[in-house]
DNA sequence: TTAATAGTGTCTTTTAGACAGTATATG
DNA sequence: CATATACTGTCTAAAAGACACTATTAA
C-alpha cells in the first residue's frame, strides 16, 4: 500500500478497531450431535427430553448454542456436547452437514451444524438426569425413532442414519461401535445390524483383508463353549478407510 | 400440561415474547460458494478480489453474511451469492461442509457454510467489476490455485476439489459442467480433465449405460470433418447418481 | 465325541479391462 | 477414397459370490 492510499483509506488496524460485530442481524448458531451406539442388537440414538421452551417436553438431539468465545472451533463445540451427555472422550465424530432457515426455530433464524458420533456401548456412562434434562437411548427403526422430535431433528437424524448406512458399505467405521479389540464375528454382526441383512462370512473377511482395515492382536478371546476367536484392532492411521472398487477405468 | 403446572410454568407464548435473541454472544455466520467450471480444458474456480478489510486486496471465495431474515434458508443464501457473481440460475449446488472457529476471521468467531457449484462455461456471464469487487477465473492445479486466498479459503477450496474429484468416480455430476445436451466424447473429456488421466472409451460407455446416467436425444451434432456424435442428456430424476459396485456381500 | 463357533480353500460365475473392429461423416 | 472421430463387439483376465471344508475350544 503506497503513501497516497494510506491517507485516503482505512488501515486494517483502524478497520478492526471500529468494527461492530453486531451491526448486522445474525442467525443463532448451534451444534447438534447424533450419538449412535448399538445395544441389544439395535442401532440406538441418544435423545434429550427438553426441559424448556420451545418444544418443551419434546425429545430432541443433544446440542446447544456455540459458546463464543469458549468453543475453539465447531468440532470442539460438538465434543463439548458429546462430553456433557456421555462423559466419553475418544470417539468417532464426523460432520454431517448444516441446517439453517428462518422457520426451524420460532425464536430466530437458526443454523445448526450437525455431527454424528459412534461409540461402543461398553464405554457408556450416560448422565441420566444431568443438565436438568433426561437423556435416553431410543432404538432406530428403518430411519426413524418411535418418538416425535423437536425442530427439524427428525430430518437431521434420518440424514445421519442414511449417511451411516451408506458409509458402512465401503468403510470400516462400524468398528467404532465396538471396543478397541474385537473379533471378526463381532464386527460382522455389527455390519449386519446396521445393514439389516446377513453377510457372507468368507467374502466379508476377504474384504477386510484386502482393504487392510484390521490387524490381528496377539492374545485371544474366550467365548462360551467353542473355539476362541482371534482379536483384531482397526489398522492405525488407516484414513483411507474406503476401499474403492474400480470406478472410472483409466486407459493403460 | 395440567392446571397446576400452568400456574407455575411459563407458557410457550410467554417464553417467546420475553425471549431475547441477543442474550448470548453469537458467531457471525456466512455462506461461501466454490464455483467450478472448465475452460480451456482446465478446472477453474471463481475468485473475488476483496475490496475491504480484512484481507483487503486478497483473493477470496465469493460469499457473505447470511441475510436475516431475507434468506429463507442456507441454500437460498448460497444461491443468492451464486447469482450475484454469475447471473446464472440452474446449476448443480451441493453443501460441502461448515468451517467455524475463533481464529478464522480477526473480527469475530465466524462460521461459514461452504457450498460448491458446477456450471457449464457456456452459460456464464460473470459480472466483472460488479459489487465493487473484481471476479476472475483461476485455474486449479492439483488442489490449489496460484494466488493466496483470504481466511481459510485455501483449505475450503482444496476440500471442495477433493470432494469433486472423489464424486466424479462414482457419479454423473461431471455432466453439470457441460450444456444440457452433450456427446459422450465431450463427457469423457470432462471426466479426463477432472481425473487428470485418460479413460478407456469402451469401458467408460459401458459404465454410463449400466448406471443409466444418460439417455440419447434425437438429433445429432456436427463436428469438423468426421462422423457426427449422438447427443445425450442426463437421465431426469436420476438422483441415485451413484453406481455402487457391490461392496458388502449379502448372504444369499 | 458332540456341539458350537472360528476360520480357510476353491470352484464357478460375473465383471471389467484390452483391443480390434465397423460406421459415418467431410473434403 | 483417405481421414478423422463415433461407436460396438468380443476375448481374456481378474474379481466376486457360493459353498463346502477344516480347526479348536468346552462340556
Image (spheres, coloured by chain):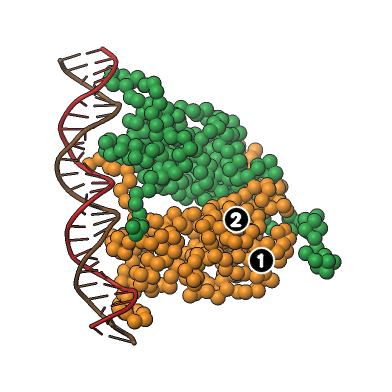
Chain colours: A orange, B green, C red, D brown
Label 2: few (<14), some (14–19) or many (≥20) C-alpha neighbours in 10 Å: some
Query: Image point 61% across, 42% down: which residue?
Result: B77
What's the residue at 34%, 69% (across, down)? A184
Relative to the observer, which residue lies in front, B116 or D6?
A: D6
Q: Residue B98 in the image: x percent, y percent? A: 54, 52
**Which numbered disc flags the more N-terminal residue, 1 or 2?**
1
Q: Position of residue B29 (x, y in %)?
A: 62, 50
Give the x, y percent position of residue B187. 36, 33
The answer, for residue B85, to whether it is visible in the render is yes
Query: Counting other residues with Cα less than 10 Å from the Cα at mark 1, is it few (<14), some (14-19), or many (20 or more)?
Result: many
Q: Which quadrant, please, contains the N terminus of chain A?
A: top right
Dot label at residue A209:
none
Q: Disc 2 designates what residue?
A: A154
Please give the residue where the numbered disc 1 appears in the rendered image. A49
Q: Looking at the rendering, which quadrant does residue B141 occupy?
A: top left
| Chain letter belonging to callout 2 | A
Amino acid at each position: 500500500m503506497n503513501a497516497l492510499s494510506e491517507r485516503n483509506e482505512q488501515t486494517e488496524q483502524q478497520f478492526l478497531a471500529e468494527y461492530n460485530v453486531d451491526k448486522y442481524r445474525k442467525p443463532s448458531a448451534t451444534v447438534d450431535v447424533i450419538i449412535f451406539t448399538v445395544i441389544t442388537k439395535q442401532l440406538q440414538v441418544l435423545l434429550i427430553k427438553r426441559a424448556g421452551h420451545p418444544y418443551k417436553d419434546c425429545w430432541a438431539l443433544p446440542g446447544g448454542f456455540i459458546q463464543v468465545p469458549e468453543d475453539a472451533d465447531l468440532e470442539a463445540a460438538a465434543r463439548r456436547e458429546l462430553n456433557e451427555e456421555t462423559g466419553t472422550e475418544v470417539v468417532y465424530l464426523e460432520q454431517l452437514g448444516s441446517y439453517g432457515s428462518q422457520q426451524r426455530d420460532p425464536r430466530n433464524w437458526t443454523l445448526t451444524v450437525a455431527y454424528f458420533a459412534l461409540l461402543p456401548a461398553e464405554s457408556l456412562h450416560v448422565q441420566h438426569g444431568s443438565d436438568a434434562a433426561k437423556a435416553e437411548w431410543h432404538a432406530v427403526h428403518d430411519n426413524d425413532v418411535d418418538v416425535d422430535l423437536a425442530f427439524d431433528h427428525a430430518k437431521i437424524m434420518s440424514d445421519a442414519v442414511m449417511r451411516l448406512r451408506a458409509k458402512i458399505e465401503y468403510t470400516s467405521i462400524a468398528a467404532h461401535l465396538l471396543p478397541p479389540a474385537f473379533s471378526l464375528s463381532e464386527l460382522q454382526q455389527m455390519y449386519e445390524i446396521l445393514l439389516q441383512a446377513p453377510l457372507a462370512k468368507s467374502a466379508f473377511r476377504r474384504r477386510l483383508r484386502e482393504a487392510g482395515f484390521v490387524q490381528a492382536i496377539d492374545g485371544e478371546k474366550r467365548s462360551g463353549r467353542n473355539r476362541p476367536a482371534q482379536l483384531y484392532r482397526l489398522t492405525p492411521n488407516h484414513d483411507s478407510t474406503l476401499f474403492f472398487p474400480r470406478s472410472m477405468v483409466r486407459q493403460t
